[in-house]
Image (cartoon, rainbow, N blue to C red):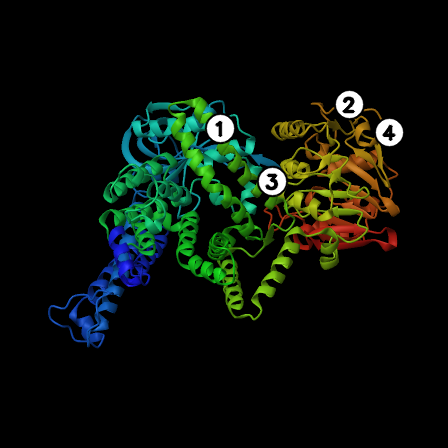
Amino acid sequence: MTEDEQTADERGARGPVWEEGPTDLRLVPLAVAAWVAAAIAVGVAGWWTVTGVVVCVVGGGLLLTPVAARWLGGTAWPGEGIVAPDAPARRGTPGWRLRATAFAGVLLCAAAGAASAGLHTADLRRGPVPALAREYARAQLEVTVTSDPRLTRPRVRGSETVPVSVVMDGEVTRAEWSDGTVHLTRAPVLLIVPPGEGRAEWLRLLPSTRVRVGARLAPPSHPGDPFAAVLKVGGGGPPRIVGPPSALQRTAGELRAGLRRATDGLDPDARALLPGLVVGDTSRIGTELRDAFVATDLTHLLAVSGSNLSVVLLLLVGSPGRAHQVERGGLAPLLGMSLRVTAVAGGALTLAFVVVCRPEPSVLRAAACGLVVLLAIGTGRRRSLIPALAAAVLLLVLYDPWLARSYGFLLSVLATGALLTVAPRWSEGLRRRGVPDRLAEALAASLAAQAVCAPVVVVFAARVSLVAIPANLFAELAVAPATVLGFATLAVAAVWMPAAEGLAWVAGWPAGWIARVARTGAALPGAELSWPGGWWGGLALALVTAGVVLAARRLPYRAPVAGLVAVLLLLVVVRPVPLTRWATGWPPPGWVFAMCQVGQGDATVLAAGGDAAVVVDAGPDPVPVDRCLRELGVRRVPLLVLTHFHADHVAGLPGVLRGRSVGAIQTTGLEEPPAQAAFVRRTAAAARVPLMRAGPGERRRIGGLEWTVLWPRAGGGAAGVGATGVGAAGGGRAAGGGRAAGGSGGANDASVALLVRAAGGLTLLLLGDLEPPAQRGLLRAHPGLAPVDVLKVAHHGSAHQDPGLIRAVRPRLALVSTGRDNPYGHPSPRTVESLRAGGARVLRTDRDGAIAVLGAGPGLVAVPGGG
């Protein structure tokens, strides 16, 4: 038997082999047309949408007429149909008909996308709910919950931390006016529940539950939002449920709750991550862990994605390359399931997956694509994943036009397209250069996904992750086992909780590995690179990426060049302090004082010798202050002074504590605002760092650094911190709830003000956020206050400054910590001119970046531009 005959016999034994052939791209322009049209139509007025639909329909119809044929220069053949792309070409076959049909299809799909968007947005403009929203009226409403409740992310607005609220999507079905008039309607809304006693009950609501609420209505923030109104629930307390969830949603909710209970005993990171990875339940994922996943571009693992469904389907049908064969892998042949039964089972599994995991953009995309592929398997027809992806996009955009404006949906589609088109070619190229098969596939997949997704991420995040590729490679090792074991835990938890807890314990190992990869990558000094945001920034990064790819294909000696680039990237990411200082000049050798760039807030650092420093304030965000301290090489903080409890000075506290030894935290005595004071106490207690109160006249010394507390005028002083080597020249007591008298008595006027003398004789005055009354009080309490080298200007350089204090201290250098484009106008031009008129050089973090100071007197030097 010849080799060809043997191969033919093997084909006959195994069943028909699906030859892939060229990639079929006919559906791609149709999907793109519907996508673009829907994205435009959801944000414009209705009559523009109607006009666009009419133009597209008329244009598409004209392209299919004989008039278009004559215009295109061809002659219609009677009875001629559209030529299939794989049919033999006939001499004289008019290509104009194919082109006309293709253009007509694009226009008609664009019309369908715009029409779907127009019909959906019509629900946002009709009925009583939009009218009530325009009047900011209050009403009694009956709302059907359509999503899982979720918590807003903590953020700082000015001096306050915005309270964490519960938000959920819903649909108003009944509206009742104050006069008793009732209107039945259907209007999608966003429901916001402020903090209150019933928050736990709100978070337990399931989709399809009907609740009755009294709320104030407001219009959506942006024209393209998929809501007719925003409902701000008043009155507090638990929800008033008037209709239970459906049986399907109750079952899904019980499965999700069982998974949460099974993971209760795991380590914090695994307990938070596993439910998110398996079913999209991110309720336990904290800000710090989320920030680590964002920095490493691993956010697709924080919640369920298409890769989860892929893992589940692979268990059923085996390797995609063998799914159509008799000897296919997976569980289906072991259970004796035929191809069609396998496809039906896969479809049912996909639908159950969507219900349990909720219809997120990536889940919907993966489900639609998976159903198309399963249909191909069941019918025995030729399959191609590119047409399946295009069909999925087309169907989903027509079903839910709001997906056309979803960044998550865009990233999901781009990543999948890159894995199907770019990654195989790059993988083959790596194999030809001797890279092992599995490593080549994983590396090509990560490179391709990052290349196409990074420009989109830049548009809204203004940053590029330099550790995304290695982080994804290492995390991918654990994704499949964590997903499989997580779904096993989900299923077993419904019948036998002890066994589910055992499975969860095993699943916790790969889940914990993923979390450690994210935290390790995010902790590297150069994990992220700032990049211009917006569409122009995204376009610039796309051009740079394309240039790099083209250069990599044409450069001679690519292996040595690739090795050199990898070493350079490693140095940029790790940023060894000596090398970084040599390359960038930051931080300058011998720096004594540094003002970090933390946005609209304060965070300053006093060098205390070696890798130790005293930190004054922590800024509004943990990430920038942590990055600043890492760049300065600070690993030990004998004392952290929080001048007062406003959020722009204390919300970054976890960033100072992250990976550092902190001896004590010293605060003012006035615990206002109470919520932020409680946050400081909780954070300090969790880190086991003692909390002390500053007192006037208190003096401290660490090595060549010494300082005196000038303000607040009254209140307890901090006791000595013997364990940390910080001495105190004065009595004190632990921080409590006493009030510190100072000026108007507000939190700003209770700021801790320090007079510092550093090594070499450098003198600094740090004023916190003192207002003019407290500044005058400080000057009266210390009439002999001498001129200083450096003034940390109070309250971010606001217009509220006491000229007498500025004249008394006559700073040589005035530093202002403020955020770019802040809404408060900080620093005030009047304050800047006053300081300059007194002979001070003014530097500000919004323009100069982080600022380091060294020297003293005539040798005083300020080095801007770090951070």
> Mark 2 to mark 1: distance in Å?
42 Å
Q: Earlier in the sequence, mark 2 or mark 1?
A: 1
Rendered position, 199 above or below 406:
above
Q: CA distance from mark 1 to mark 3?
A: 38 Å
Name the mark on residue 158. Answer: 3
Please report the residue visible at 82 percent of the width from the left and 32 percent of the height from the top. 726
CA gap between label 2 and label 4 equals 13 Å
Q: Position of residue 3 (x, y in %)?
A: 31, 62
What is the secondary structure assignment of the residue under circle 4?
loop
Q: Which residue is mark 2?
A: 733
According to the image, label 4 marks what residue? 729
- Left or right? Give the position of 64 relative to 249: left
Whether the residues at callouts 4 and 1 have beta carbons within 8 Å, the answer is no
Under mark 1, the amino acid is Thr
Query: Mark 4 and mark 1: span between their CA atoms?
Result: 50 Å
* Residue 226 vs residue 502, the one in the foreground: 502
The 10 Å Cα crowd at callout 3, few under 14, some 14 to 19, many 20 or more, is some
Q: Quadrant of residue 801?
A: top right
The answer to whether the residues at label 1 and label 3 have Cβ atoms under 8 Å apart is no
Query: Camera-side residue: 617 or 16?
Result: 16
Q: Which amino acid type corresponds to the residue marked 2 in the rendered image?
A: Arg
Q: Residues within 10 Å of mark 1 (few under 14, many from 20)?
A: many
Tell me the number on the disc at residue 263. 1
Where in the figure is residue 114, as x and y percent of width and height?
A: 30, 54
Q: Residue at x 40, y 50 (%)?
A: 405
